[in-house]
Image (cartoon, grey):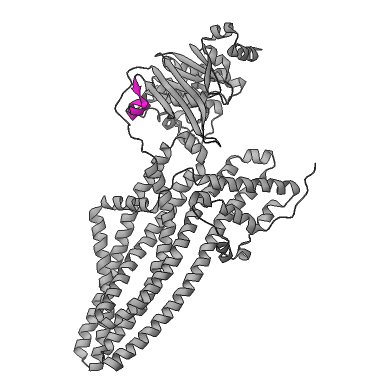
Amino acid sequence: MTPTTRSPRPARRIDRRAVRHLAPSTGLELRREDWRDAHDDDLALPVADARASSAGTALAADASEETARRRLAEHAALLPIATARAAARFIGARLREHPLEALATLASSVLAALAAAWLPRLIGSAVDLVTEGDGDALWRLGALIVVAGLLQAVFSALAWAQVSALGQRILAGMREDVIDRALDLPAQTMERAGIGDALSRVADDVDVTAKAVTNVVPTLVQTAFFVVMTLIGMATLSPWLLILVVVIVPLYVLAARWYLPRSARLYRAERVAMGARAQGLLSAIHGQRTVHAYGLEGRETAHVAVLSRAAAVLGMRVIVLVTRVVRGITVTENIAIALVLILGYVMVQGFGAPLGIVTAAAIYLTSLMWPMMMVIFTLDDVQSAGASLTRMVGVIESVDPAVSPGTEVPRDASIDLVGVSHAYGTDDDGAERTVLAPLDLAIAPGETIALVGASGAGKSTLASIIAGTLVPRHGRVLHGGADLAHGDLEAVRAHSSIVSQDVHVFRGPLAADLRLARPDATDDELVTALRSVGALGWVERLPQGLGTVVGEKGEQLTAEQAQQLALARIVLQDPAVLVMDEATADEGSSGARVLELAALEAARGRTTVIVAHRLSQAKEADRILVMADGRVVEEGPHDELVARDGVYARLWGAWAS
């Protein structure tokens, strides 16, 4: 049936619903009045243009909108976000790691603020000297004014540089920690979260925080000290000026208390929307061949448009809040100017106060207006950076660093699973979704085990648990008698390795890629490893041989060559235990036998677990485990299982026919 073209709904409805789905995971409540404040009519971006080029595209866009909203809701809850208090504790701990730098920064900031607060008093005194006609004293006071100005400039510049340097030093460590923790994330977590969220945290969030450290934080520190010192200066200049402090400061505080909580919620949601947008863009770009093949350009464009509109609307809502708070602050400033004029007149005419005191008070007040507004909006920028900071700290503190959980070291190449089972999440009834039923398994040193079964049978889950890349929900995994939950990390990593069907070729010389497995390997050892897996022929045909740059923007390797490269790394690493998770699954029949022989060579002399994509691989194993629905339903060598005429025999019959 030919789809009918529907009239597109207003673009702002798409944006509202897309952003509203951020609420469950961020605590952001998007109320009707909030949207009214955001001037919906001005924010009605033309999403319909991205989805109405044809009837089919319109229907695809609807699906894309639903996908976008669902991903927005799911996205934020996948990788952890720290609380503001946790982020503050984290920064406090990092500052304590640099005590001398922190104290020097504090001293420079205080001295700069003192010099700035000294100037109005000097100028007020100069006014009194002018009225008295004391020229010599006026020249001396003028010199002090110049000195105070120079001191303020010097200490302000020094404080700015010190705050920026200290912040960048802390940020550099945080950037390394975020990347380190992201790399330590379990593969399953990264797959659910998507690379977009992790990329957003190590790119967008770090960038936002870096800009704040360079520009915003120094401004905030200096301005905050200036405001405090100015208020103290006003209060000590004359008790009458406390009236101005008591009346004016609360108005600024009220403006800040109204504005900052509202903008903070928006910035947190905006960071989430940026991560979702990054994921949507990456998905579309990485899948561009499929997109072109099925004509999904309109669908993907609309999908990304919805994610982008969500971030855009949130940003525009912040602008609306800014205009409203500026309007309120302008009223406050007018009140302040009127008060200082009235109070000055009363002090001079009614109480005979020196004109210099009133002049100093006026300078204090007028010089205070802009810094007070700067404090509010600098705090606003800090909140934006704070939203990014909580996402960074969330990864750093919620993901355990790759440290050894214990000191146990494998004694041999045996593998023992005791009561191991696993489940992912829960179903609608709250029960665990079991993917691997309780299992006891003993693998002797040097034994080769093949895991076979239909897709979803639990083969890859069991292989990941055996390799130590997935922690089972229940049970113990022992390598050579060492419990992986209490093992020495470096010893366990050297003891076992895993090769999957997704092989990454790092950009750089081929020799450097191979030396990832063993940095001290000689060129002769690299050649030997390549020869053992049948890869030396094509390596010698490369333009610069082992020195040829491969990977992104370099020589592109085929899937077969990439797998041979991964197997050559195994030969160089020489682990006692090898897990191959469908390592030859992507290769066609022409290269299948080549890779199977290479895999057999890489596995020679090791305890090996093979997730067999081809039963010809399973046939060579010492023992075959047939899996179904997360359970081992048959077990034994090839000939015995075929003679048993069970599940494996039927699989083999279908394969061999």
What's the residue at 41%, 25% (across, down)? 475
Q: Using residue 155 as the reference point, say whether residue 293 is left or right of it.
A: right
* Span of residues in magenta: 480-493
Closer to us: 178 or 154 = 178
- Residue displayed at 25% across by 56% down: 101
Q: Position of residue 305 (x, y in %)?
A: 61, 52
Extreme residue in the front direction: 429
| Residue at 34 percent of width and 80 percent of height | 244
Q: Is residue 28 above or below residue 124?
A: above
Residue 651: percent from left, percent from top: 61, 15
Left or right, 68 with respect to 324, comes to right
* Residue 281 in sight here: no
Toward the viewer: 172 or 385? 385
* Residue 161 position in % (x across, y down): 31, 61
Residue 283 vs 229, above or below: the answer is: above
Q: Does the magenta portion include 473?
A: no
Q: Quarter of the image for the C terminus: give it.
A: top right
